[in-house]
Amino acid sequence: MTSVTVKIIKPHSERSFAEDVAGIWAHRELVLVLARREISVRYRQTTVGLLWVLLQPLVTTAIFTTVFVFFIRIPDQDGSYPLFAFAGIAVWQYFTRVVSEGGSSLVTSSALITKVSFPRMIIPLVSPIAAGVDCLIAIFALVLLTALFGAHLSWTVIFAPLIILAVALFGYGIVLWLAPLNAVYRDIGIVMPFVLQIAMYLSPIVYPASLVPEKIRWLYELSPVAVMVDSMRWAVLGTNAPSLAGIGVFIMTIVILFWGGARMFRNMEGTIVDRI
Amino acid sequence: MTAAIEVRGVGKEYFRGVHHTRTRLLSQTISQWGSRLVGRSLDEDYSAVDVEPFWALKDVSLTIEQGKVVGIIGRNGSGKSTLLKIMAQITAPTTGELKLNGRAGALLEVGTGFHPELSGRENVFLNGAILGMSRGEIARKFDEIVDFSGVEAFIDTPVKRFSSGMHMRLAFAIAAHLDPEILIIDEVLAVGDAEFQRKCLAKMKEVTSDGRTVVFVSHHMNTVINFCSECVLLEKGAIQAIDRPRAIADIYFSSENRRARASLDFAWDSRPGDDIARLCGARILDADLKEREDFDRGEKIGLEMTFEVLKPGYGLLPNFHVFMQDQCAFVSSPQQEEELVPGVYKSTMWIPASFLNTGFYVISIALTSLNPMLIHFYTQEVLRFRVSEKQGLGVGFDIPGVVRPTIDWNVALTDG
């Protein structure tokens, strides 16, 4: 008999990051099946169905347009605020879903992980993929709206999918920390919505960074959240590109999140089902 | 023979107490970090008070050879589920290690991941992928799975509209078509209707007949006997015995029925029964009318009950119920009921020599009236005895069956 696969199970996993990636790759079919389940279940038995994907950022955009343009009267001479806000909101709503759904994913999938074995790291990977489809549709709508109402579309629009991917990586890096921690300390799931809401108002998502006092504007340029939102605006709306320093910080943040998050996840995953 | 599964010194520690695992409040963790920072230990304040460690498994070593169908049996809390979870890679061991030679698949539940909103078809692909089948593999087996489940007509209906029976059958059908090199099964087979269960067992036997290794965890001794060639008995987190399933069953049932024995006497005020008749006591006898609980298959075995009749006018029928493990071997009584005047009676039944199989038997005792139907007493599992065989057929395995009567046989060469 030729046994090809030999597996040794030890108290503590001694995998490398490359083996983590290989494990996820080997289970890519399962990731896709789970993501497809998320997508097809999300809007089932709703009357407008997939239209919700667009209605959510559109309604939010309408609210912020009303508040900022008509009540607060921020400078918006060319009427480009709605597109500006829509781009920010679409990216932000995607990021929020990745972080909040991903953060609680090990707990919500406890029925699955207590019964079946597979690399646990694929569980928080499901929402970046499932929500990524929603985000792609929203950005596609943004492109259409820009073409209809806005200025000319720049060739940089081809970077939009890449930017979504970068947001996914950023969110997944955070979730690698949050998901196992939330399984043991549920406080995280409760605190998360507040933190996200605070982060939203602190970041130039529904207002331009130019409204921020000059003195602290450098902070905004380096903020990873500002970088990911401004990158999308640059790609689709042709606004100013984020600074190179900002992009550098963004990439460094992702590397650090992955490096530490993967270690944390690996240390906790072995006994996570005993502690959920 | 190569080993499919090697378990080396595996132990698993759990914590009972607050939250029954090592869940601590974030505040406690932070205050502990804080106190460590200022060099003061707060450890005594918490660990001793809320959590109490215990070992669900202790230093378990075991080798399961390729192609064997091995049962793991034990009572609740014996550690069998923990061992199963470690083998299935659901949770990591605290000590030791485990080596799996071959693609392993585990079946701890049927229908894991089934989503009520999705159709039967979608769920087959979903559950199949969760259990580790590739998309191509599921597509290839799809028709067979649907056919096996018998829910063809509803395959495109959301499973929330399924009856629980249909749900179960579809889930089982997928599970039965799983064929990794090493299959680890929990006692999921213990549910579902008997007919379908048999069909699943047959399918699994077919799957396992070509050199696959199966580990089957259960507390259903009869399923283990029917299904497995070897059995591991776990008790209190340690391996108590590894043997053929019947030998294990003997140990399992003998330790389970501690109340049972070779004789029993009831005190006058605790005799079971009604106002017509009561049981005084019972004994197991050998040919010399001596109490005994170990017999050779070549000996006859006497079962005797003593009962007192309090009221005349009822037809009475004493009867013995003979069980092997949890299966009824036979029930025996006199040919006819008899009206007895008040008094104390002894009634004896003789099981002929070379009638029972080897193994462990448990006796229940009853006294019945047929017309009108009345059960005066039915005392369950109160006597026990063991039958062994010094000179037998010399086969190296257990002969199945709750009885093995010696019957006339004739083997002759025919002319044709």
Image: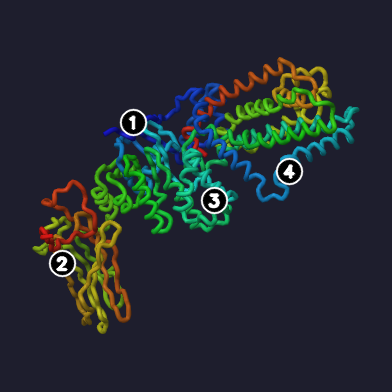
Compute the Cα span from label 2 to label 4.
Answer: 81 Å
Q: Amino acid at mark 4?
A: Leu
Crowding at label 3, few (<14), some or many (≥20) Cα neighbours within 10 Å? many
Compute the Cα span from label 3 to label 4.
Answer: 26 Å
Tell me whether the residue at label 1 lies in contact with that at label 3, contact meaning CB atoms closer than 8 angstroms.
Answer: no
What's the mark number on residue A51?
A: 4
Q: Quadrant of the N terminus of chain B?
A: top left
- Based on the displayed image, in which of its 4 quarters is residue B377 positioned? bottom left
Chain containing mark 4 = A
Q: Amino acid at mark 2?
A: Trp
Q: Which residue is mark 1?
A: A2
Q: Amino acid at mark 1?
A: Thr
Q: Is residue B345 above or below residue A5?
A: below
| Nearer to us in this view, B317 or B50 | B317
Q: Quadrant of the C terminus of chain B?
A: bottom left
Chain containing mark 2 = B
- Same-chain status of marks 2 and 1: no
Residue at x-position 59% and y-position 42%: A37
- Based on the displayed image, in which of its 4 quarters is residue A100 positioned? top right
